[in-house]
Amino acid sequence: MSLRIYQDPLHGGITLDSDIPEEAMIMALIDAEPFQRLRRIRQLGPAFLTFHGAESSRFTHSLGVFDLARRALKKLLFCDPELKSSKGLIYASALLHDLGHGPLSHTGEGMFGILHETWSARLTREHPEIFKPLEAYKKGTAESVANLLENGHADRNVAKALVSSQLDCDRLDYLIRDSYSTGAKYGQLDIDRILSAITLSPDGELAIHPKGLMAIEHYLLVRSLMYRSVYNHRINEVCNWILEQIVRTASQLNPEELWADQFMAKWLWEPKQIDISTFLANDDIRTGYHLMRWAEEAPSHLSLLCKRFLNRHLLKAIEVNHLSRENQLELLAQARLLAEKQGQDPSYCCGLRHNKLHGYLPYKGGLRLWDGKDLKALEQVSPLVSSLIEPTDSSWLIHPREIHHQLLNTISDFKTSICI
């Protein structure tokens, strides 16, 4: 017997036993090159510039998701012992769900135009260090895991629900982990209560026992608060915008004008030609090194963007969601004129950034309460959950700090004209 223990700051000791086939498989997957790369991918992307403790990795998060999925499945096996046949699928999918993240996690998707679900599935199917342990456990497991990660398909819907749903182990871990690393207090969930309340409805789907209603309400409210206070924080929006402008600007230059190593060159100028080795070669370290080089030797407009990010000389942002689309565009035009007067190129310092926060989705995998007699939709029982259904929009005007007060005055003029 070989035991391995990962000491997690949130979940305590995550123990793996090589005598248990599913856990032996997990040990092999953890040791694989693609999974070890997740140590070099920040969980919260550039949020460390907003919350200085936000330095945790996708590796740490993925281990936490696996541990929660294992605990959840142990509970559900009391409801349906036949779920044991999905044990390997659930374990592997929980561990590998973020395998395909690019540099800076979700920010990298906007920067480079990739989908981490697509790359997670591709690595599962094609990388030998991932494919072989899955197939050694049980033939066909690799394709089953890839299909779940990419398309959300599984023989048992409850297997998918534990990995990707409105109450999945991914969300449970990232809410408490991101709360912990950022210092935000919103994400302190009652994980034990939530896991003790999960059950199976008569149709075999994931459900919640009414005893866990308040813990689930708290979880859904926490998710909304974390998006508003952490994930969509004003400074995060600015950092994401700057990083996207950096990659857009770099990719528009000719290879003769800009230094990039053989891997980054593919990411910038031949994105459709990225193979597995080229994908795995890019992480926060390689991207960060290129930003440093470009800050020193790239054309001036790209150099300035890189220096803004690296030295945290960030742009400002004003929330303009309350303004009409017409007024937002008018304000952007005003910002561009003011920036130009300051001697700055508005193409690299002025922009509008829009985000939509989807609320609770009752008609797409909505949660249900099951007390052994009645099966009810969660939003029908809970006014609080019902209030979280409506999605919210956020719009930010990004601009140089030198023109901030002038733009605030312009917004005041908009408000005055509306009142008149």
Image (cartoon, rainbow, N blue to C red):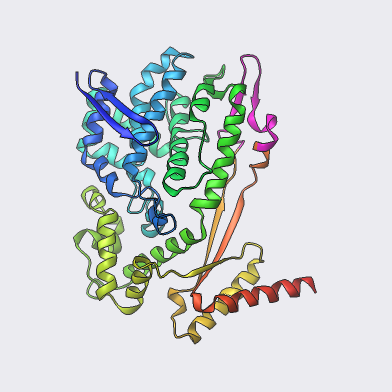
Horizontal arrangement in the rendering, residue 46 relative to residue 37 (left or right):
right
- Does residue 380 show up magenta in the picture? yes
Relative to 386, is 395 above or below? Answer: below
Q: Is residue 217 visible?
A: yes
Q: Quadrant of the C terminus?
A: bottom right
Relative to 169, is 255 above or below?
below
Q: Quadrant of the N terminus?
A: top left
Please say whether residue 352 is one of the residues in the magenta stretch. no
Examine the image and state in which quarter residue 406 appears: bottom right
Residue at left offset 32%, top offset 74%: 303
Q: Which residue is nearer to you in this view: 66 or 132?
A: 66
Residue at 27% across, 25% down = 16
In the displayed structure, 11 sits above or below 414; it is above
The magenta segment is 362-384
Q: Position of residue 226 (x, y in %)?
A: 52, 47
Q: In front here: 162 or 72?
A: 72
**Residue 330 figure quarter:** bottom right
Q: Position of residue 233 (x, y in %)?
A: 51, 56
Image coords of residue 405 (percent x, y)? 58, 77
